[in-house]
Image (cartoon, rainbow, N blue to C red):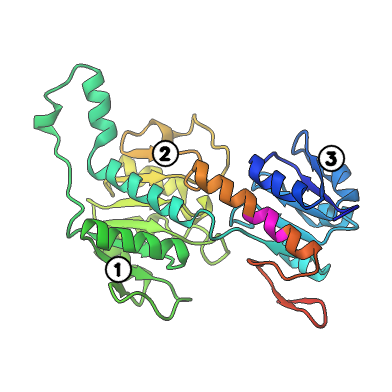
Amino acid sequence: MKNKTVYIPLDIEYEGKNYLKSRGYKIIIGEDVEKKSVLEAIKSCDAILTRSNVMIDKEVIQAGEKLKIISKYGVGINNIDVDFASKQGIYVTITPEANANVVAEHVMALMLILCKKIMIMDHALRSGNFDIRNNLYSEDLEMKTLGILGLGRIGKLVAAKAYYGFGMNVIGFDPYQEKEASFIDIKQSLHDVLVEADIISLHLPLLPSTHHIIGVEEFAKMKESAYLINTSRGGTVDEKALVVALKKKTIAGAGIDVFEKEPPDVQDELFTLDNVIVTPHSAALSKDGSVKMAIHAALQIDQVLSGKEPSWPVQEWDAMNKKILK
């Protein structure tokens, strides 16, 4: 594609860049993600391939006079003004098939670390406490009840791994999903999941309706032996309420990959607690998954700039009228 330019504010894997270069696109790699730099670079670009830490707001979109597509490396679109992009006739795309399994595996890893007390035992043994084996016992996953909030692609994968791989009972709640796998016991309310589950895993987008969907009242409904795992979006959990619940042992523990503020302040009390496992919003970032995200994001740029519909748009597209439908 001669004379077509793709702006990548934060560098991606070689495979994604090579995909674009092999098709004749010029690539601009950003030097930083400061808004001033983004506004300047996007002026001459036909597409932007962005990560979560670059804000693509109305001002940035307006600056991209030639912009045809905002291709997200990942699935979260909280950093993109999708409504304004739609009004401008600009595609916004995501890469949902690149890392769903990677995130599901991360959830299972956090679940195992918590239930098998791996971090606690590791630290004790490194301190010379071999007798920890007689004082602290792990928990079986088999026959435990996993509650899944949000039964999209990742939620369903977690459910399948838990049910078929570990013999867990699976319950779930998602008001927007009508038909689920037969092995998932669909509950009619969030309350039902909270009171029944031994482990709760969140797989929700961050919307006004899901902001702090897990807070003081919700923790009070959970079992004292329950664990919370969040690999979705930080704002879905009230972190102050989480700290209180962990300190008071209202719940047994938590595995947290996402935070209300990123990067989080490691001086926050959450990071002082020994019944929480934290990872740096890295659930989706396996080597294989990252390569897939880069390629899938690049693929959709090529599709749009070639006059085709992208594989994973977040808007519906009326090809005849060339308008994005809400």
* Label 1 environment density (alpha carbons within 10 Å; few <14, some 14–19, many ≥20): many
Residue at 48% x, 76% y is 176
Q: What kind of element bears circle 3?
A: helix
Going from N to C along the chain, the mark reached first, 1 or 3, is: 3
Numbered range of the magenta stretch? 296-300
Q: Give the vertical position of 297 relative to 21 (above or below).
A: below
Q: Count residues near mark 2 (Cα–Cα under 10 Å), then give few for <14, some for 14-19, many for 20+.
A: some
The answer to which quarter of the image holds residue 310 is: bottom right
Q: Is residue 72 left or right of residue 101?
A: right
- Give the class, few, some or many, for how many residues have Cα within 10 Å of label 3's Cα (few <14, many ≥20): few
Q: Main secondary structure of the magenta part?
A: helix
181 or 253: nearer the viewer: 181
Snapshot quadrant of residue 189 = bottom left
User: On residue 36, which mark appears?
Assistant: 3
Which residue ends up furthest to the left in the rendered image? Answer: 134
**Residue 210 x, y percent position in the rendering:** 51, 63
Tell me if label 2 and label 1 are in contact, CB under 8 Å.
no
The verdict on residue 298 being magenta is yes
Residue shown at 42% from the left, 37% from the top:
270
Left or right side of 117 for 208: right
Disc marking residue 278: 2
Residue position marked by numbered label 1 in the rendering: 171
Rounded to the nearest angstrom, the CA distance separating label 1 from label 3 is 47 Å
Q: Position of residue 77 (x, y in %)?
A: 64, 57
List the single residue furthest toward the bottom. Answer: 320
* Amino acid on which disc 1 is placed: Ile
Q: Residue at x 22, y 30 (%)?
A: 121
Residue 4 spot, x, y in % from top left: 86, 53
Residue 159: x, y in percent?
33, 63
**Measured along the vertical axis of the image, is residue 57 above or below residue 124?**
below
Identify the amino acid type marked 2: Val
Q: Amino acid at mark 3?
A: Lys
